[in-house]
Image (cartoon, coloured by chain):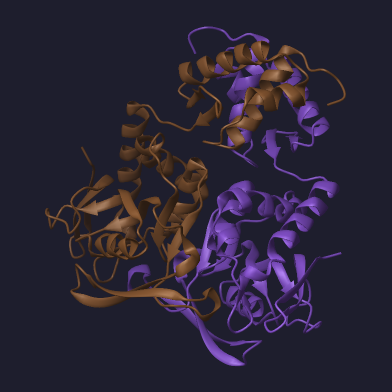
Chain colours: A purple, B brown
Amino acid sequence: MNNKLNKAERLSYITKILVENPSKVFTLQYFSEILDCAKSTLSEDVDVIGKLLKSTNQGEIYSLAGASGGVYYAPTFTKEQMEDEKIELCKNLNDKKRIITGGYLYMNDIFYDPRKLKKIARAMVTSFLHQEIDYVVTIETKGIPLATVLAGMLNKPIIIVRKSARLTEGPTIQMNYLAGSSRTIKTMALPIRALERGSKVLFVDDFMKAGGTAKGVIDLMKEFDVKVVGVSVVMATKEPVKKLVENYYSLIELEDIDEERKTIKIYPKK
Amino acid sequence: MNNKLNKAERLSYITKILVENPSKVFTLQYFSEILDCAKSTLSEDVDVIGKLLKSTNQGEIYSLAGASGGVYYAPTFTKEQMEDEKIELCKNLNDKKRIITGGYLYMNDIFYDPRKLKKIARAMVTSFLHQEIDYVVTIETKGIPLATVLAGMLNKPIIIVRKSARLTEGPTIQMNYLAGSSRTIKTMALPIRALERGSKVLFVDDFMKAGGTAKGVIDLMKEFDVKVVGVSVVMATKEPVKKLVENYYSLIELEDIDEERKTIKIYPKK
């Protein structure tokens, strides 16, 4: 950098780099070289930014000690922000205009909007930010934008399980599974080179009914020697209470869509 | 906010909000209320941030005058950064380990990685940042993560064209089209309520050969009274030189994959 920055400019620059790269660790050495500034000064700068973000509920700055140490920005929500987001989502979804013949709910305007996904992903990711996760896994198609935004917050790649094998993706592991709600046999497929053996993944999807898809993905991951360390969906149905997966997170719960009476019952999940 | 911030903290806070919401316009009034600070002071703050980002090649801050005025962060690349990104992408792709039986190229590790997509999308979006675009359109599946990241930079929703109509998405316009390269008839479908009549969209995809898919999407959009104002793909094949769409952007060009000799020829597009 040509001109040495003053304190205000340094704070702005560091904030920019950290916020644009959530969960990515930057060493103080990195900033020290770019900004031509002592690490002790930068350490104070990062402290100021961390306190500022925390006090304004704008996420958090974490420090890692040791040789691989550094600082990173975590786009966390407070408990209150998380509850607010659930309530807003329910309000948005409990709109009878969304009801589609067959008792379905039109939700593309939410799941395909990066602005809304940013808030949803933030509410979902807060529980997983400090867990060891190598990939975010989803199954095509509707959950892909959400998985992309969420993986961006974790600074990890996504894995998209396909509904059939593709010529263009090379050798593939293909598997049949029972879609829990409709009791029909479906297929999922993933290229062999898609992920490394021994990895840990977070499975993310827009919707869960019986949990057959989530269970299928967990089984498929076993074929890759990969462990699913979390299952997180935006909305799960109240019934069946017992899902095919034991542990899962959901932001909101769908109790009922009554096509005839034009009523929808969606609540924040406790 | 409880305590009034000093200049350095103000700059950090404003940078945080702007950078986390690319292309979203914030009024000075908005910051004035949150930060309890005069608009003239904030205007100077934003100036400092804008100059800092520009001088460090970290994107730009734009101001809009008038009643709907305000400031926003644009994640632009300089020409040099754009060329660097193309070269890096070619280097990454020109790796014979990527060759798949049938003469295909394995690219999921790039197109499914938000970290790499951020740089690719940035190189693609720079030309479209100040154009009037209402939606970013793509077709399932491989281009969806890219479209999501790119739409996030434009602060717009994405539209995902499906390969068949879904019960769960309500009434749909379905259309057959000729996939240019294989001369086979394929189907694309989009829910009627997916986008507003009279909109302008940018079509984004990972790959283009003859351009049949892009042409199909342009035709489908006509059924919605929607205009495709740009076609942007990451990689296009050199042959056929004459594509089925007249104008398109691509970052890089695929000349040849020789499965037998294990050679790949991919170059930055001029």
Q: Whole-percent x and y of residue A121?
A: 66, 53
* Percent position of residue B171, x then y: 47, 76
- Please tell me which residue is depicted at 78% across the width and 83% down the height of the picture: A239
From the viewer's perspective, is residue B79 above or below residue B108? Answer: above
The quadrant in which the C terminus of chain A is found is: bottom right
**A129 or B188: nearer the viewer:** B188
Q: Residue at x 75, y 33 (%)?
A: A65
Q: Position of residue A127 (x, y in %)?
A: 77, 54
B260 sits to left or right of A269: left
Q: Is residue A27 rendered to the left or right of residue B170?
A: right
Please determine whether, in this image, residue B14 is positioned above or below residue A109. Answer: above
Left or right: residue B83 compared with residue A45? left
Q: Is residue B178 left or right of residue A238?
A: left
Q: Is residue B64 visible?
A: yes
**Image quadrant where residue B89 sits:** top left
Kindly tell me whether residue B232 is visible in this rendering: no
Residue depicted at 63% across the width and 49% down the height = A118
- Give residue A39's position: percent from left, percent from top: 68, 17
- Which picture quadrant has residue B77? top left
Total marks drawn? Answer: 0
**Image vertical order of residue B174 relative to residue B117, above or below:** below
